[in-house]
Image (spheres, coloured by chain):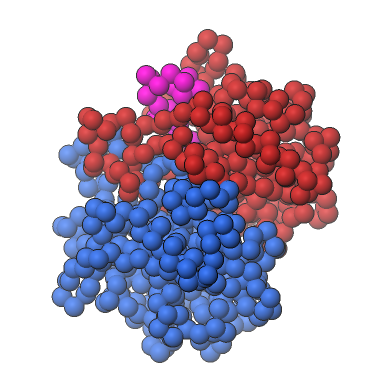
Chain colours: A blue, B red
Amino acid sequence: MRNCRIAGYGYYLPKNTVKFGDQIRYRSNDQETELFMAVKAVNSALKNARLKARDIDLIVSASAVGVQPIPCTAALIHEQALKGSSAPAMDINTTCTSFITALDIVSYMIAAGTYKNVLIVSSEIASAALLEKRKEVYELFSDGAVAMVISSTNKKTQGVIAVKQCTWSEAAHSTEIVGGLTGLNATQLTDENYDQYFFKMDGLDILRACTQKLPKMLEEFKAENNISIDDVDMVVPHQASKALPLIMKKLSIPKAKYIDHVKEYGNQVSVSVPFTLCKAMEDGDISPGDKVLLCGTAAGLTSNILLMEV
Amino acid sequence: MRNCRIAGYGYYLPKNTVKFGDQIRYRSNDQETELFMAVKAVNSALKNARLKARDIDLIVSASAVGVQPIPCTAALIHEQALKGSSAPAMDINTTCTSFITALDIVSYMIAAGTYKNVLIVSSEIASAALLEKRKEVYELFSDGAVAMVISSTNKKTQGVIAVKQCTWSEAAHSTEIVGGLTGLNATQLTDENYDQYFFKMDGLDILRACTQKLPKMLEEFKAENNISIDDVDMVVPHQASKALPLIMKKLSIPKAKYIDHVKEYGNQVSVSVPFTLCKAMEDGDISPGDKVLLCGTAAGLTSNILLMEV
């Protein structure tokens, strides 16, 4: 148990939505940049936590794709949202599950007394990397941002209870954006390799890997930590795709115990897990004292499971 | 004190060097990609630590600029160096001081017993982002990679003793690569904004910020942790520029107590700190039991100080 608590949260959804059948997706406009949405979410989270920017002693950006190659995205959010502060800024990245990894790391630091109030921010402009001809992904992803303040607590049962993360890199290329950094940089873009600068996902390949790997991983997590799904009040999964119920069934997680709003919000990349958690707290589906299981898969192929008493 | 130890290290320097006056710089060729060099460094580190890939239970990529926007760089290194393993992969980024931040984070996890053998890898192709007309940076940076295995230890005095990190985002744009990710993506490159996809550094601005901020930060670090520079056996600074002696003088760190090999290797971005540490251990300038102060500044503007008994 690493004691910490969610002291506040905030999110930003783009004004504009599009519909694909009954599926609603959020699409940012030119003003709604990754940084703009991140700062909006941070300001909401600070207000919700009744804290000032100067109360924050660490800011972590936990997004899949950053704003600039240099500096790290957290420093750019810091510039706009924590002006004048000297709180450290760092990026932590495991693609879609970056928030879970960041929360895990931050829980060590808070439990050790190093930091008292930590901001974790996820913000994504997935839509900028989508090609219309790749229908499977074009109709799946949404843009948005979320920020959470994770703080110290005196409540002995509150915080991160157990964590497991795995990476199976044999599926490293099932989900990727190849171009933009050192592997294939911006100046190397040509008409021939243009598509490599956009998001590519082999959904079937991932689904196959997930149904093969995830049940075993969850069994190990439960056995290692002596936890049963009966002990969990709510499962907050990454909203990876419309196949979510299929995966949950494979994991023997009953329909009433997990949140599925793929239809309403789509896959928001790293934003999905913290946004789903925020929304559930806001709507009263998760209450203080509840045991919440955050989980999801990410490009890598990485999978994270984290059990927390909120 | 968070107990851990350096169980092994390895590095890779490009075959090709160039000289600017008496300054030697390493420049990778087309085969020596960020990933290629990272994997070479990992293999050396594993050999040096007498460990197999299957012994590693976490891999962290701690580089300023990654290989692809998706997945994270650690997953791509995992694919080539830890084939078949399910050890988690994650990226931690504070630009030039990423290794110090990663070592700090990893020390919590090892001290808590979560992981036993962690690989931290820094690899950079700085040269790909340098414009020849920007002489100050063109003649400063080198390419290279380094990997370290950080392991658990039974020695009570060994490990991370004290840490301080600050970010002063008023200088966030003094060091940057603007283009390549969501802020200005690859498809937005034009003849007019071409230079924005390359590294830009306002050296004078950073030097001014450093001489103003760093002495106070170091004083606070020493006071908070009751440490004197006399207690430190060796200072391993980021090899930021030829102004290193000037900064060390401002910090009252005597010449015999720090390593300056800017002339021999240049600024290797995130690789500088761990490479300088590796080289000092290899050359016998740092021995087991020594107290080593890792420090440096990074884009952000971020500064890190970490005291460790190796």
Determine which quarter of the picture holds residue A297. Answer: bottom left
Along the line of sight, the residue nearer the viewer: A61 or A51: A51
- Identify the image quadrant of the N terminus of chain A: bottom right
- Relative image position of residue B288 (x, y in whole percent): 80, 39
Along the line of sight, the residue nearer the viewer: A69 or B16: A69
Q: Is residue B121 magenta?
A: yes
Query: Is A246 situated left or right of B112 in this image?
Result: left
Query: Is A218 situated left or right of B264 in this image?
Result: left
Q: Can residue B259 be seen here?
A: no
Q: Can residue A34 be seen here?
A: yes
Query: Is B111 situated left or right of B14 in this image?
Result: right
Along the line of sight, the residue nearer the viewer: A273 or A117: A117
- Relative image position of residue B52 (x, y in whole percent): 62, 50
- Identify the image quadrant of the C terminus of chain A: bottom right
Q: Is residue B156 magenta?
A: no
- Relative image position of residue A204 (x, y in whole percent): 29, 67
Determine which quarter of the picture holds residue A125. Answer: bottom left
Q: What residue is drawn where x is 37% and y is 31%?
A: B198
- Relative image position of residue B120 (x, y in whole percent): 59, 47
Q: What residue is drawn where x is 48% and y is 16%?
A: B18
B190, above or below A152, in the image: above
Segment colored magenta: B119-142
Determine which quarter of the picture holds residue A51. Answer: bottom right
B284, above or below A31, in the image: above
